[in-house]
Amino acid sequence: MKTKILKTALPLGFFIFISSIIFIADSANYNFALRWVGAVPYGDKIGHAVLYGIMALLLNYGLSYKKIKGLPLGAVLVLIFAILEEFSQIYFPSRTFDLKDILADIIGIALFSLWRIK
């Protein structure tokens, strides 16, 4: 029972966390954390890799490491979300579409998908 709750709560909680970061960035209401990440060399790319990687790890766990055509389903779903989110930035004057962000997302998702939570 505890594992079932964790498999739902962890990915959902992290999705809400990432969604709040996206909302803050889309609204151009940059807080200290976003300004700090922007000040660190490659901080944005590292942030993409780590955040989307953790999201993939947790969703893979939540979906019990199910695969689709040999790929972890959670990783595929997170990658689709990341790509859609990056393309959505075209419509926000405060944001910039960047293929390098998608590359960072792919790297993070791939690396974190190698791990398993027991």
Image: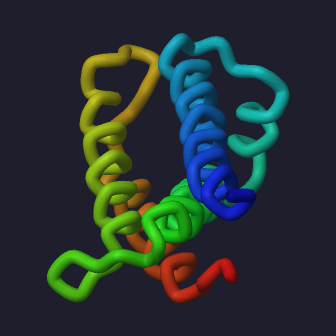
**Is 23 placed left or right of 92 in the picture?**
right
Q: Quadrant of residue 67?
A: bottom left
Query: Percent x, y for residue 1?
Result: 68, 58
Q: Residue at x 81, y 39 (%)?
A: 36
- Quadrant occupied by the C terminus: bottom right
Q: Which one is in front, 87 or 81?
A: 81
Q: Residue at x 27, y 53 (%)?
A: 80
Q: Which one is in front, 31 or 55?
A: 55
Q: Quadrant of residue 46?
A: bottom right
Name above or below for residue 25 compared with residue 107.
above
Query: Percent x, y for residue 26?
Result: 49, 19
Q: Which one is in front, 105 or 56?
A: 56
**Residue 45 appears in view:** no
Q: Residue furthest front?
A: 1
Q: How many marks?
A: 0
Q: Residue at x 59, y 32 (%)?
A: 16
Q: Which one is in front, 73 or 114?
A: 73
Q: Quadrant of residue 70?
A: bottom left
Q: Residue furthest left?
A: 69
**Is 71 placed left or right of 23 in the picture?**
left
Name above or below for residue 37 compared with residue 69.
above
Name above or below for residue 55 compared with residue 96.
below
Q: Tell me the colour scheme of the image.
A: rainbow
Query: Percent x, y for residue 47?
Result: 63, 54
